[in-house]
Image (cartoon, rainbow, N blue to C red):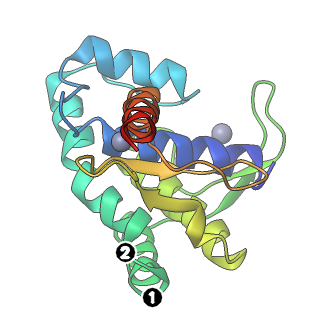
């Protein structure tokens, strides 16, 4: 494990959320939003409304910047997002989780909590000097984000689809050579 479990979950969720804006766009319905909540082990307030869906979707460009802007700009964004949400770190333990940090109330809008959790996760990334774990997909036509949590830093593509498409292209190129 590169980061603590809650940091990795926050990063995986942030990347999935940003990538949902890539064509074909996903996270377009409350049902998909619900599935996202479950998949990424969220707790706390979840309205299941179109308003919440819009708030979460609207977060995507800012999250994309947070995850890819480079250390200086990312640090500015982290500080901005934490200040905006009036984040106050609290050490908590709930359900089966180990000790981890919450920085906004469980009653805060989900989009606010996603923003704060992503910012908190980027604190770990920057402090560990691990920014290079985040990159843009190596596929020429894809803007998806890649989070590489592998030991040998071998991940270059955002999805199975991009991995397979590029493997097939490389195979064809070799056969032509
Ligand atoms: Zn928690
Ligand atoms: Zn891709």
Residue nearer the viewer, 47 or 29 = 29
Total number of numbered labels? 2
Residue 153 falls left or right of residue 135: right
Question: Tag 1's secondary structure?
Answer: helix
Residue nearer the viewer, 30 or 2 = 2
Which residue corresponds to the image point at 26% horizontal and 49% vertical from the top-left? Answer: 60
Q: Is residue 164 above or below residue 77?
A: above
Residue at far bottom of view: 72
Residue 64 falls left or right of residue 120: left
Badge 2 crowding class, 10 Å Cα cut-off, few under 14, some 14 to 19, many 20 or more, is: some
Residue nearer the viewer, 2 or 127 = 2
The image quadrant that residue 174 belongs to is: top left
Check if mark 1's residue and mark 2's residue have beta carbons within 8 Å: yes
Badge 1 crowding class, 10 Å Cα cut-off, few under 14, some 14 to 19, many 20 or more, is: few
Residue 42 in the image, given as x and y percentages of width and height: 54, 30
Residue 62 in the image, given as x and y percentages of width and height: 27, 61
The image quadrant that residue 90 belongs to is: bottom right
Which residue corresponds to the image point at 42% horizontal and 24% vertical from the top-left? Answer: 36
According to the image, label 2 marks what residue?
69
According to the image, label 1 marks what residue?
72
Residue 10 in the image, given as x and y percentages of width and height: 56, 46
Ligand 2: image quarter: top left
Which residue corresponds to the image point at 36% horizontal and 50% vertical from the top-left? Answer: 112
Question: Tag 2's secondary structure?
Answer: loop
Q: Which mark is residue 152?
A: none
Residue nearer the viewer, 117 or 18 = 18
Quadrant of the frame with the C terminus: top left
Residue 35 in the image, given as x and y percentages of width and height: 41, 16
Q: CA distance from mark 1 to mark 2?
A: 8 Å
């Amino acid at each position: 494990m590169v980061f603590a479990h809650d940091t990795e979950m926050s990063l995986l969720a942030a990347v999935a959320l940003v990538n949902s804006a890539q064509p074909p766009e996903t996270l377009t319905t409350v049902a998909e939003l619900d599935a996202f909540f479950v998949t990424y082990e969220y707790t706390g307030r979840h309205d299941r409304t179109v308003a919440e869906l819009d708030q979460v979707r609207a977060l995507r460009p800012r999250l994309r910047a947070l995850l890819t802007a480079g250390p200086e700009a990312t640090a500015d964004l982290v500080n901005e997002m934490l200040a905006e949400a009036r984040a106050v770190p609290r050490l908590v333990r709930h359900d089966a989780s180990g000790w981890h940090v919450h920085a906004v109330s469980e009653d805060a809008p989900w989009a606010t909590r996603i923003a704060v959790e992503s910012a908190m996760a980027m604190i770990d990334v920057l402090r560990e000097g691990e920014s290079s774990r985040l990159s843009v997909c190596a596929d020429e036509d894809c803007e998806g984000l890649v989070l590489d949590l592998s030991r040998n830093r071998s991940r270059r593509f955002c999805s199975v689809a991009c991995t397979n498409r590029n493997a097939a292209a490389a195979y064809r190129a070799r056969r032509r050579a």
